[in-house]
Image (spheres, rainbow, N blue to C red):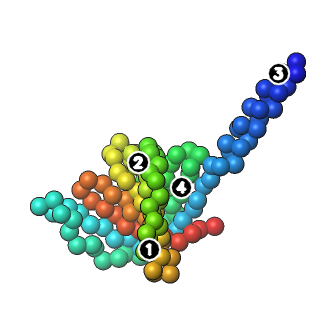
Amino acid sequence: MNKLKIGFLLLFLFFGLNQGFSQTYKFKTTGLSVSAKEGKGKFGNWSDLKPVSIVITLDTKKNRIAIYSEAIQLFEIVEYLPTEENSTDLVYLFVCKDNNGENCTLSFITRKNQDNRKQLYVKYEDRVLAYNIVNFD
């Protein structure tokens, strides 16, 4: 009976601690710009920054990033890549699969030399979307 109690206690602690490390982060977009690959495989110029107000969530418990635009974009996080940091940027990288099954990479970037401005890049093989974002409570 004692072993059963200890087993339940350890199981409770495991699930309790596991829940404590999973978090949900919310952001709100302030602008959107896009770029597409051109004929020679290079990305073209960025479009003009369009003001947009969209909620974005990063849910590490569900391994999902959601962009709540007119058509909701869901990204299943397939792999958490190591954080990259240099003198100008702090980058959190995620290998994802969108709700159409297409592979992409999402990058949350903090621009250190630009008053810690935050951006989200959604990069596909043939196009990139860049959102300017702020923390959202």
- Residue highlighted by disc 3: 4
Q: Earlier in the sequence, mark 3 or mark 2?
A: 3
Disc on res. 73: none
Q: Is residue 114 above or below residue 12?
A: below
As helix, strand or loop, the secondary structure at mark 4 comes to: strand
- Residue highlighted by disc 2: 96
Residue 75 image position (x, y, % from top left): 44, 49
Q: Nearer the viewer, mark 3 or mark 2?
A: 3
Q: For the point 31% across and 62% down, which residue is it? A: 128
Q: Nearer the viewer, mark 3 or mark 1?
A: 1
Q: CA distance from mark 3 to mark 2?
A: 40 Å
Q: Mark 3 is on which residue type?
A: Leu
- Judge left or right: residue 84 versus residue 23: left
As helix, strand or loop, the secondary structure at mark 3 comes to: helix
- Judge left or right: residue 62 versus residue 70: right
Residue 5 image position (x, y, % from top left): 85, 25
- The residue lying toward the viewer, choosing from 17 and 64, is 17
Residue 38 image position (x, y, % from top left): 16, 63
- Residue highlighted by disc 4: 58
- The residue lying toward the viewer, choosing from 2 and 87, is 87
- Residue highlighted by disc 1: 87
Q: CA distance from mark 1 to mark 4?
A: 25 Å
Q: Earlier in the sequence, mark 2 or mark 4?
A: 4
Q: For the point 41% across and 48% down, which residue is it? A: 96
- Judge left or right: residue 129 versus residue 81: left
Near mark 2 (Cα within 10 A), the count class, few <14, some 14-19 or many ≥20, is many
Cβ atoms under marks 2 and 4 closer than 8 Å? no
Q: CA distance from mark 3 to mark 1?
A: 53 Å
Cβ atoms under marks 3 and 2 closer than 8 Å? no
Q: Mark 2 is on which residue type?
A: Cys
